[in-house]
Image (cartoon, rainbow, N blue to C red):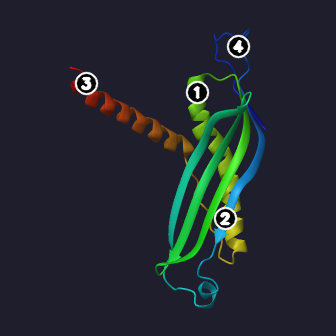
């Protein structure tokens, strides 16, 4: 699977390397499923609405080889009913991506938005399969807009830099 960007009109093409992102491998790096209150959770199921705690983060950025980057989606889903944990799922869904021809300032977007968008459907399927195999009804994670998440992270980083610059300004005078 390969995504190719075509040069913009007027852009130099003779000496510009072709830009592309290619999936080399998608794999599960780590997985855990726990049902701490079984078999009671199956024998005396709760009638109350389960509470779902969902945590997700993206790891990656440093090349693992020439133009080869590992990106990892880490997810932890904890489902509780009546203050008891029904189940806990932890998955590290990873991918190796060949990324060629992009400028350094484009890499954070590719690592934190583009590649996670490719990995997420695999993560979603893994979580759902684990939950079903654990004896519970399917849990389908809602789609995630990684572009919006990345934009929010960039905005927060800029605000922190501005706040730090303002805090340092009076100390310098």
The residue tagged 1 is 106
Q: Is residue 153 shown left or right of residue 140?
A: left
Answer yes or no: is residue 53 visible. Answer: yes
Of the numbered discs 2 and 4, the one sitting upstream in the chain is: 4
Front residue of 168/13: it is 168
Q: Which of marks 4 and 1 is nearer the N terminus?
A: 4
Q: Earlier in the sequence, mark 3 or mark 2?
A: 2
Element type where label 1 sits in the image: helix
Q: Name the residue under label 2.
A: 32
> Is there any visible trace of residue 117 in the rendered image?
no
Question: Which element is circle 4 on?
Answer: loop
Residue picked out by circle 3: 169
Q: Residue at x 58, y 39 (%)?
A: 112
Q: Which of marks 3 and 4 is nearer the N terminus?
A: 4
Mark 2 Cα within 10 Å, few/some/many (few <14, many 20+)?
Answer: few
Left or right position of 139 against 53: right
Query: Could you say where residue 5 lies in the image, as x and y percent from the top left?
Result: 69, 26
Q: Is residue 67 left or right of residue 42?
A: right
Badge 1 or badge 2: first in the primary sequence: 2
Q: Name the residue under label 4.
A: 16
For the point 67% across and 64% down, the residue is 32
């Amino acid at each position: 699977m390969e995504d190719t960007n075509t040069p913009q009109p007027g852009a130099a093409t003779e000496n510009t390397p072709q830009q592309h992102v290619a999936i080399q491998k998608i794999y599960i790096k780590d997985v855990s499923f726990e049902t701490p209150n079984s078999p009671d959770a199956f024998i005396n199921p709760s009638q109350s609405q389960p509470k779902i705690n969902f945590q997700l983060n993206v790891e990656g950025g440093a090349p693992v080889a020439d133009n080869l980057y590992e990106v990892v989606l880490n997810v932890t889903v904890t489902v509780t009913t009546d203050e008891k944990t029904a189940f806990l799922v932890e998955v590290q869904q990873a991918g190796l991506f060949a990324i060629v021809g992009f400028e350094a300032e484009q890499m954070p977007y590719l690592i934190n938005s583009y590649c996670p968008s490719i990995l997420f459907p695999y993560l979603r399927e893994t979580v759902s399969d684990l939950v079903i195999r654990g004896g519970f009804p399917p849990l389908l994670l809602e789609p995630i807009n990684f572009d919006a998440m990345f934009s929010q992270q960039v905005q927060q980083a800029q605000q922190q830099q501005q706040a730090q610059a303002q805090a340092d300004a009076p100390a310098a005078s």
